């Protein structure tokens, strides 16, 4: 049954890492597996139309990429000439939003796979032997999840993943935590060890050549009972401090990255964890700081890191969940304090919470509002999603106190977007007038203001709904009316030079160390 035609589709969203699931499926079907012809595309590539495909696989990533995913499924049905039984959709979104996918009438017949492909191929893919489906008899073969990724398919597309020259591995799956904001418990379940990291690395190297970096996709590797053994494997593979790899006529530094971050609540219990991590070429050490209640374990973990020479640090900061804006500021500001005290380099990446089964980014946390979320997004756009630990850059971007930060979130968005113009340029008098009026508002009037701003699109601000507002709020709303495009363009041109002051610090953070998705390009 060899030489079947297999099409792999990754939707056309931007993403940092190549699709491991499709790479393993390619290994299953390719010339080292079933000896089929495998084609990989990203997005809706018309070149695959008109060919008879025996099976089409589509991967999915974040749930809020619903529209991109939907386009790929619709496109696959077109490519399959309407035979939806040939189409298999899996991955994160397909698992976490499974019911939403299967109830779409236009996708009737498409196979939506929930969870990992960690059973025999025929079982994981829900193949029916009575329908004589392709490879339905493969009920005892190696699970697709355990196969070595096929890196060769990445050469079939033009898209360049920021992280590509790396061994992508798992040492564990699942997590000991059951955080309500996280999809891992639903997707992978409890913590368990997986296959040998050494075996996977050696197989990748043998088949596709040596890779520069070692990227762990684990969700909570320090919780693994095999943690010390994992570190020992990493060292045996040569990923020790200062490790390099020859690339042509140049030499590149290698690094290890636990890309999902490590758990401060475990790191703070015993300096052994940081001692072990310091024995490998980890860069950066990513530590999550999801809420202010984790301040004590987080701070202790950072101090242990500094003691063991781990000074290149990064962390994820969840916001828009149960936190308040002031809570987020305190977490961000703590890193500035720790940077100065311990002489470390911590870059933070605020990550806006969205429910794992929501097909768009419209969720507003109970302590946030749409106006604040958009304000935060504009600030992060200026810093490229990064919160620098440098006091100078932090103060410019976020203010020096929680009150300053919250007041910044209240500002008209063109005041934030063009901050240097209004704070230091010709717009300063307008900002002063706004501040005078804003400072006179009561707390109830501030709530009234953000309620109005959050419930009206920009084109309606100052034009609709004013009759329902108190006189003080109605007066200050005039500052929130969007600028004419030509006016804003002239302001933008005048303040470009100062904008570089806010953004230049991020240039020290390589693309492969940034987060997977910061949501900077989307409206709130």
Image (cartoon, grey):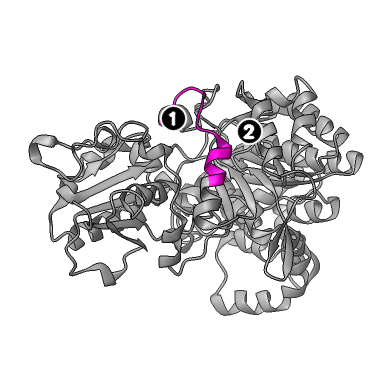
* Residue in the image at 45% along x and 37% along y: 355
x and y percent of residue 438 in the render? Answer: 69, 50
Q: Is residue 40 left or right of residue 491?
A: left
State the residue in front, 167 or 189: 167
Residue 320 lies within the magenta run? no
| Quadrant in the picture for residue 115 | top left
User: Which mark's residue is nearer the viewer, 1 or 2?
Assistant: 1
Q: Residues within 10 Å of mark 2 (few under 14, many from 20)?
A: many
Q: Earlier in the sequence, mark 1 or mark 2?
A: 1
Q: Is residue 495 visible?
A: no
Between 458 and 507, which is closer to the camera in this rendering?
Answer: 507
Q: Secondary structure at mark 1?
A: loop
Which residue shows up at 33% across the image and 55% down it? 31
Task: Give the structural element (helix, strand or loop) at label 2.
Answer: loop
Q: Is residue 194 located in the magenta-colored stretch of the structure?
A: yes
Q: CA distance from mark 1 to mark 2?
A: 20 Å
Picture coordinates of residue 246, whole percent (x, y): 70, 62
User: Residue 142, image x and y in percent?
Assistant: 35, 35
Asked if the residues shown at circle 1 and circle 2 are in contact, with their CB atoms under 8 angstroms apart, the answer is no
In the visual, does 235 lie left or right of 482? right
* Residue at x 82%, y 43% (from the top left corner): 311
Q: Is residue 163 above or below residue 304?
A: below
Q: Which mark is residue 290?
A: 2
Frontmost residue, 246 versus 467? 246
Q: Name the residue that disc number 1 marks.
A: 188
Q: Tell me: 73 left or right of 132.
A: right
Q: Estimate the x, y position of residue 53 in percent, counting from the top left.
A: 20, 59
Neighbours of disc 1 within 10 Å: few (<14), some (14-19), many (20+): some
- Residue segment shown in magenta: 187-202
In which quadrant of the rendered view does residue 274 lie?
Answer: top right
């Amino acid at each position: 049954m060899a030489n079947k035609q297999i099409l792999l589709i990754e939707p056309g969203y931007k993403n940092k890492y190549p699709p491991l699931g499709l790479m393993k499926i390619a290994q299953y079907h390719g010339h080292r597996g079933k000896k089929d012809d495998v084609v990989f595309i990203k997005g809706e590539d018309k070149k695959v139309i008109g060919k008879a495909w025996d099976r089409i696989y589509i991967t999915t990533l974040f749930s809020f990429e619903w529209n991109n995913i939907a386009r790929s499924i619709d496109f696959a049905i077109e490519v399959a000439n309407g035979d939806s039984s040939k189409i298999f959709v899996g991955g994160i979104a397909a698992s976490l939003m499974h019911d939403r996918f299967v109830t779409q009438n236009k996708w009737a017949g498409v196979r939506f796979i929930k969870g990992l492909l960690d059973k025999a191929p025929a079982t994981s893919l829900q193949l029916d032997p009575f329908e004589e489906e392709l490879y339905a008899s493969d009920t005892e073969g190696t699970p697709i999840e355990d196969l070595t990724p096929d890196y060769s398919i990445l050469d079939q597309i033009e898209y360049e993943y920021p992280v590509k020259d790396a061994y992508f591995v798992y040492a564990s799956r699942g997590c000991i935590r059951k955080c309500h904001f996280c999809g891992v418990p639903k997707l992978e379940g409890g913590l368990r060890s997986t296959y040998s990291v050494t075996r996977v690395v050696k197989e990748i190297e043998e088949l596709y050549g040596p890779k520069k970096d070692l990227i762990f996709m684990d969700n909570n590797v320090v919780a693994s009972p095999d943690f010390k053994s994992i570190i020992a494997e990493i060292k045996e593979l040569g990923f020790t401090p200062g490790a390099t790899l020859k690339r042509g006529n140049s030499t590149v530094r290698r690094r290890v990255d636990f890309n999902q971050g490590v758990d401060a609540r475990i790191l703070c219990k015993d300096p052994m964890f940081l001692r072990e991590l310091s024995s490998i070429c980890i860069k950066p050490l990513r530590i999550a700081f999801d809420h202010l209640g984790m301040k004590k374990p987080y701070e202790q973990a950072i101090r242990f890191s500094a003691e063991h020479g781990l000074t290149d640090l990064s962390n994820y900061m969840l916001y828009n969940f149960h936190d308040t804006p002031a809570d987020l500021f305190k977490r961000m500001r703590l890193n500035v304090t720790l940077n100065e005290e311990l002489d470390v380099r911590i870059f933070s990446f605020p990550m806006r919470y969205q429910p794992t089964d929501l097909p768009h980014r419209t969720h507003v946390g109970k302590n946030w509002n749409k106006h604040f979320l958009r304000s935060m997004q504009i600030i992060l756009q200026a810093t490229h999603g990064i919160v620098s630990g440098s006091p100078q850059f932090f103060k410019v971007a976020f203010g020096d106190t929680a009150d300053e930060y919250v007041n910044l979130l209240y500002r008209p968005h063109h005041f934030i977007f063009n901050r240097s113009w209004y704070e230091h340029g010709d717009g300063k008098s307008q900002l002063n007038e706004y501040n005078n009026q804003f400072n006179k508002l009561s707390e109830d009037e501030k709530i009234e203001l953000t309620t109005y701003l959050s419930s009206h699109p920009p084109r309606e601000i100052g034009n609709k709904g004013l009759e329902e507002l108190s006189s003080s709020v109605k007066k200050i709303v005039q500052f929130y009316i969007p600028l004419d495009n030509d006016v804003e363009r002239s302001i933008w041109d005048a303040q470009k030079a100062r904008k570089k002051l806010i953004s230049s610090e991020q240039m020290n953070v390589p693309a492969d160390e940034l987060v997977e998705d910061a949501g900077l390009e989307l409206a709130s």
